[in-house]
Amino acid sequence: MNLESPKVTIDKSAQDCFDFLSNVENFEKLMPENISKFEVLENDKFLFALKGMPEIILKKKEVVPPNKIVLGAAGGKLDFSLTGDINEIEAGKSEVTLSFEGDFNPMMAMMIKGPISKFIETLATNMPKAI
């Protein structure tokens, strides 16, 4: 299952966006209002939970400064990744797209597609205000 957020334009350089997303503490500022828990576990790993959903632990898996950062599931039964692609479109202005990729059975994919789509869309739309 592959899902993509809308592209958001941010009035910052690609490096500024990358630096923001590289600090896992900053993801708390991007989370939706229905977050019930957020906790930094290590400097590259955090846990969060949305109301009515199980806790999810994300860990930094890959970084390609200043254009890409990949967070992946750290433990748990589900294997997935959340990738931030950052493109500088002009000096001091960047576009960021978040993409979610996971391998789920059809029943699970059907159940989580809506909530995950809304989740990554919220993360993306909160970026211009947070960065």
Image (tube, rainbow, N blue to C red):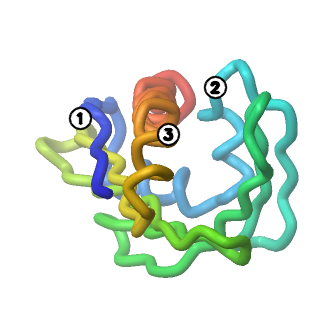
Which mark's residue is nearer the viewer, 3 or 1? Answer: 3
Nearer to the camera, 114 or 85 = 114
Question: Are there few (<14), some (14-19), or many (20+) residues within 10 Å of tag 3?
Answer: few
Indicate the amino acid at tag 1.
Lys
Q: Residue at x 24, y 37 (%)?
A: 93
Give the labeled residue for mark 3.
111
Indicate the amino acid at tag 3.
Met
- Residue 129 at x, y = what percent? 51, 22
Q: First in sequence: mark 1 or mark 2?
A: 1
Secondary structure category for the residue under label 2: loop
Give the labeled residue for mark 1.
7
Give the labeled residue for mark 2.
32
Is the C-beta separation of discs 1 and 2 under 8 Å? no
> Which image quarter holds the N terminus?
bottom left
Is the C-beta separation of discs 3 and 2 under 8 Å? no
State left or right for residue 47 relative to residue 8. Answer: right
Q: Residue at x 27, y 40 (%)?
A: 92
